[in-house]
Amino acid sequence: AQAAAPGLSAGKGYVDVSTVDAGTSQAAAAIIRATGAEFLEAPVSGSKAPAEQGALIFMAAGDKALYDRVTGPLDVMGKAHFFLGEVGAGAKMKLVVNMVMGSMMASFSEGLSLTEKADLDPAVMLQVISLGAINAPMFALKGPNMIKGTFPQAFPLKHQQKDMRLALALGDELGQEMPVAAAANEMYKTARRKGHDDDDFSAVLRAVQDAK
């Protein structure tokens, strides 16, 4: 925002799609609005493939007039977009979504590891999950590579852990108990210590596998 501010003025707008905490987004909004320009935070749900396919989900908040002006580009880049109100709401929603995603992946990783320890076929476990109520596209997308022990990066593990940390900080701020997310965060921290910062976040599997 600081770098962009000199080029902004009344009649212009600034759309920020980064994943940050609400306080950081509000500070950026203050910088942009001081120039007379409008500000919209619009963090996204979706990684590399959804971006390439125009299937991102935008969680926008800030100046409604700017949101209304950019719905065309948002429609091209995404499959859905939501206006959530005042600056900070989009940032908070993104952290909630990424916290749920990270916790799901941590639990799935424990399941894969336990399956292997029990001398069961993880590919069959993946099929069983795919046919039941807990099926999720993320499991179908990431599972086969995880079984092979490969983690091609779509969303870096270090960024997932950062989002878990920010979500837990939001929970602390609001007095919300989050024991599952806290435990999942520790798994991501373990995977980071094992050198998986720049692997896909599915490499959290390595946190619960022996000597890997």
Image (cartoon, rainbow, N blue to C red):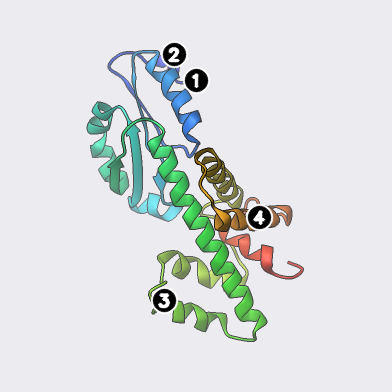
Q: Which residue is mark 3?
A: 130
Checking the image for residue 186, the label placed there is 4
- CB-based contact (under 8 Å), mark 1 and mark 2: yes
Does residue 29 sit above or below 207 in this rendering? above
Residue 12 spot, x, y in % from top left: 31, 19
Q: Secondary structure at mark 1?
A: loop
In the image, which is nearer the foreground, mark 4 or mark 1? 4
Disc 4 residue crowd, few under 14, some 14–19, many 20+, Cα 10 Å: some
Q: Secondary structure at mark 2?
A: helix
- Please say whether residue 187 is visible from this viewpoint: yes
Residue at the spot of label 2: 6
Do residues under tags 4 and 2 come within 8 Å of each other at their CB atoms? no
Give me the C-alpha separation between circle 3 and circle 1.
46 Å
Please tell me which residue lies in front, 175 or 89. 175
The type of residue carrying mark 4 is Glu
Find the distance from the CA under tag 3 to the CA under tag 2.
51 Å
Pick out the residue farthest to the right: 211
Q: Which residue is mark 1?
A: 3
Q: CA distance from mark 1 to mark 2?
A: 7 Å
Mark identifier at residue 181: none
Residue 183: image quadrant is bottom right
Q: CA distance from mark 4 to mark 1?
A: 35 Å
Q: Nearer the viewer, mark 3 or mark 4?
A: 4
Disc with the residue nearer the chain's start (3 vs 4) = 3
Q: How far across and down, in percent of the image, does residue 131 sit?
A: 39, 79
x, y percentage for residue 5? 44, 17
Q: Is residue 200 visible?
A: no
Residue located farthest toward the front when viewing the structure as drawn: 175
